Image (cartoon, coloured by chain):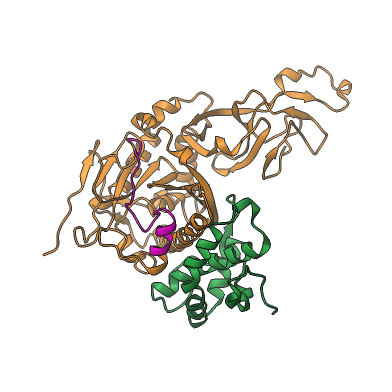
Chain colours: A orange, B green
Amino acid sequence: MSAKLETTFRGDTGQLERRISMREKLTAAYFERERERIFRRAWLPIGHASHLPEPGSYFVRELPVLKTSLLVVRGQDGKVRAFHNACTHRGNKLVRSGAGCRKSFSCGFHGWTFSSEGELKLVTDEHQFRDLDKGALGLRPIHTQVWEDLVFVNGADAPGESLREWLGEMFDEYGGYFEQHERVASLRINVNSNWNLAVNSFTEGYHTLYLHRNSVPDYQGGKINPDRHRPFMQLFKRHHRYSAPANPDHRLTPAEALVIKYGKRIIPAFGGEMPALPPGVNPSRYEHWAFDVVQLYPNAVFLFGNNWHIELFFGPIDVDHTEVVQDLYYYRPKNAGERLSHQFFLSRGRQVFLEDMNTLEAQHAVLSSGILSHLQLSQQEMSLMHHYKVSREMLDE
Amino acid sequence: MSDALLPKGFADLRHLGEWIVPTEEGRHKKKIAADIETARRFYATVFPRMEAIIQHLNGVAWEMMGPADRNLFLLASMCMEVSHPVELGWQTTDIADAFPTSRVQFLSESAGY
């Protein structure tokens, strides 16, 4: 008889559907409702304030689900703002792409120039305009707030909830966590799949025994938890999180043993020195903790570990296409040995990610064909049930 | 191919210049383009030297690293990359059932790797 670990559930588990009908969810009409009722009302994370290190620092972020491109800028006053990346003269794209640092932004069409705070500063041949109100022609802002270094935007005219309300009790539980890590790698894939399916693939651990049997064969569960049940799951009003179980008998490969001798443990080697993690990380203080998976509804998934975290963004392009970006953040290395340790873990993590990505197009094709009428979900996939419950609520509100 | 420039003490690895690849994308593609036997031979040559490589490079300030040490770091990075298929016993260097690399965009490598 194998040992069983029973999951501790916290939060409102009522109104969850264990059979999820998908066919309607994969139609263009449904996607348009999601766009207006969910994405336009949600606080969406779009990047890091620390990636805007000085006044004038900026990056461009495409947001097709809101039918816009954003210019995210740190002003001369130090404040981070996001604007629709469009010249207010004729609507040309102000900054084509990328990131950098500028005192002002000039449109390549007619030279209208805006400050890093979004004010219209210069109009070419201004006297040829009649009744031009420059004060009303600044860049069009989008509601922007920063939480723990993450920049969020909200596309509503007047957001129904503040970012604090949107994040709920998680708002106060991650103090200082993000600033311990720096980005070491980033991958982007445009996948022919609906965004819901993409998010769902990263928010349950049931698949890890099989899908990742070659890339990380024994990193979770082990003899004490052979089915890899999550020790802890928590459902919030919009978001959810769970902890993944480490395998205390994980067998280190020779390279893995070497890199943890000269560096710190990152996935798939867990444990080691545990500093005082914020209360939101390993919230149940599970003894054999590996990492947490946190879905910031609707479309961001974070893996929070000790010395590392991963950020996944699932940007809907249309009902059938999603841009997936995976950013790896690790502790800051002190020497070449720690950098080589990073190389080991980030290359292993890439293999795991490419396995996760490879089921999506097959799932999408089958589920949109109607061959399967429903998804059948296990208790270990409760986060998917919760995802669709929150969507129902937001679509109906 | 001519021998790679490597620090004194690592002359035994100079014939491996083709494995010195400066980007994450390049290393991943080099790995999956190699057959598993070639990867195993590369690993068998470099891995026993890894501890000496780390100890040598840990004595060099990252910002002051010259081209020979940089090459050694990149060679060791490739060893880390190749260690997965070799140590996990895969039959090929590209994992079965993985999303195709040709459709993956490798973005910024901000840590300077």
The span picked out in magenta is A257-279
Residue A225 placed where, x, y %?
A: 20, 58
Looking at the image, which residue is at 42% across and 45% down? Answer: A302
Measured along the vertical axis of the image, is residue A183 above or below residue A144? below
Looking at the image, which residue is at 42% across and 41% down? Answer: A298
In magenta segment, residue A276: yes
Q: Nearer the viewer, residue A312 or A371?
A: A312
Measured along the vertical axis of the image, is residue B104 above or below residue A335? below
Q: Quadrant of the C terminus of chain A?
A: top left
Residue A74 placed where, x, y %?
A: 63, 30
Q: Is residue A7 left or right of residue A367?
A: left
Q: Report how many numbered discs are placed on residues in the image.
A: 0
Task: Give the overall secondary structure of the magenta segment.
Answer: loop
Measured along the vertical axis of the image, is residue A27 above or below residue B33? above
Would you say residue A187 is visible in this rendering?
yes
Residue A91 placed where, x, y %?
A: 72, 35
Q: Residue furthest bottom?
A: B37
Q: Is residue A360 left or right of residue A8?
A: right
Measured along the vertical axis of the image, is residue A196 above or below residue A37? below
Q: Nearer the viewer, residue A335 or A236?
A: A335
Looking at the image, which residue is at 35% across and 41% down? Answer: A275
Q: Quadrant of the N terminus of chain A?
A: bottom left
Looking at the image, which residue is at 84% across and 19% down? Answer: A130
Residue A85 placed where, x, y %?
A: 67, 36
In magenta segment, residue B6: no
Would you say residue B22 is visible in this rendering?
no
Q: Nearer the viewer, residue A50 or A307?
A: A307
Query: Which quadrant holds residue B113?
Result: bottom right
